Image (cartoon, rainbow, N blue to C red):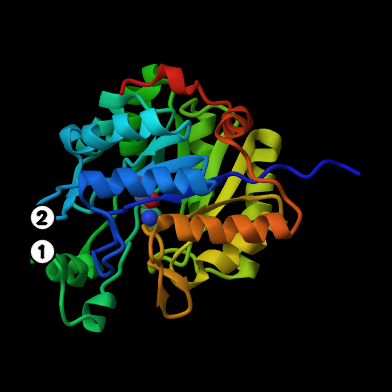
Amino acid sequence: MAKKPKTIITCAVTGAIHTPTMSDALPYSYDDITSQAIAAAEAGASILHLHARNPETGAPSVDPEDFRPFLGRIKQATDSVVNISTGGSLTLSIQDRILPTKTFSPEMCSMNMGSMNFSFHPLARRYDSWKFDWEKDYVANSDGNIFRNTFRDIQEAATTLAPHNVKFEHECYDVGHLYNLRFCMDIGLFKAPIFIQFVMGILGGIGADIDNLVFMKRTADKLFGDDYRWSILAAGAAQIPMATTASQMGGNVRVGLEDSLFISRGVLAENNAQQVAKIRRIVEELGHDIATPDEAREILDLKGGDRVAF
Ligand code: KMH
Ligand code: ZN
């Protein structure tokens, strides 16, 4: 019988684009991001997807000085693969958003594969109180915002980051983004094996259900053959159910408070590690082993933790 592939767990620890601080568990200070990232790695996440926030205002930050305090400490305490976001915030240019990756040359960074009206404005009606002043307007106005990565933006990011040999987490929020990625590969921007994150359940993108996952996977098979590895990130309540399904289809999984503040229906997660432990338990009980950071490096053909600049 063929050996089952190991499952890579990514944990998206803090978020910022669409994750206002509506749970006290969501880390935004340097210390809390550090300790939650380390605990998530200890619970079984081999990749840590990281955003930074201004520790006073909690606002999304792409200032490398807001990454530096936690990157070094995470590297000292864990062997995990660091993946820095290039999504940053809805309002920033691509050059601003890739600055942390340019500065720290991590093994991985995110790359959003298109432009869309990534919206979470319905949340504005759901909450009466907000931790920070900026959050309510930011959330309410997301219905009028374009989450932007044009072909030109993607080309600029890929070209600028090429000397860093960083592996992209290609975030595809809909089927069309897979075709954008195929086009970018055809013009030589990205090399196989590529790593695709199917992002499901974001308003503005594809819904989180099994039919859509099968369709995304079938389309990726058609477009990329053996040249790709994949993972799923489903937002909100769909996070763990869709990750469970994907893991049984040979996919990898992403959890973390960036994408869902919950541990089960209506119950807030206490921290990131709790979500990692839950999906790990499910994946292992269903017969798959989880990948260590070095196994993730091999599966994704990463440059190695000794070739980063932090
Ligand atoms: N939280 C995801 C839905 C990025 O960091 O570039 C969006 C994300 C984008 O992870
Ligand atoms: Zn992110």
Which residue is tagged 1?
Answer: 134
Q: Secondary structure at mark 1?
A: helix
Q: Which mark is residue 57?
A: 2
252 on left or right of 142: right
Mark 1 residue's CB less than 8 Å from ligand 2? no
Q: Is residue 76 left or right of residue 80?
A: left
Name the residue rendered at 41%, 35% in the picture. Answer: 82
In the rendered image, residue 26, in percent from the top left (x then y), is placed at 30, 60
Residue at (40% x, 50% y) in the render = 12
Can you tell which of label 1 and label 2 is closer to the viewer? 2
Residue at the image position 41 percent from the left and 65 percent from the top: 260
Residue 199 visible in this rendered orientation of the protein: no
Tag 1–tag 2 contact (CB < 8 Å): yes
- 127 or 289: nearer the viewer: 289
Q: Quadrant of the C terminus?
A: top left
Residue 94 visible within the image: yes
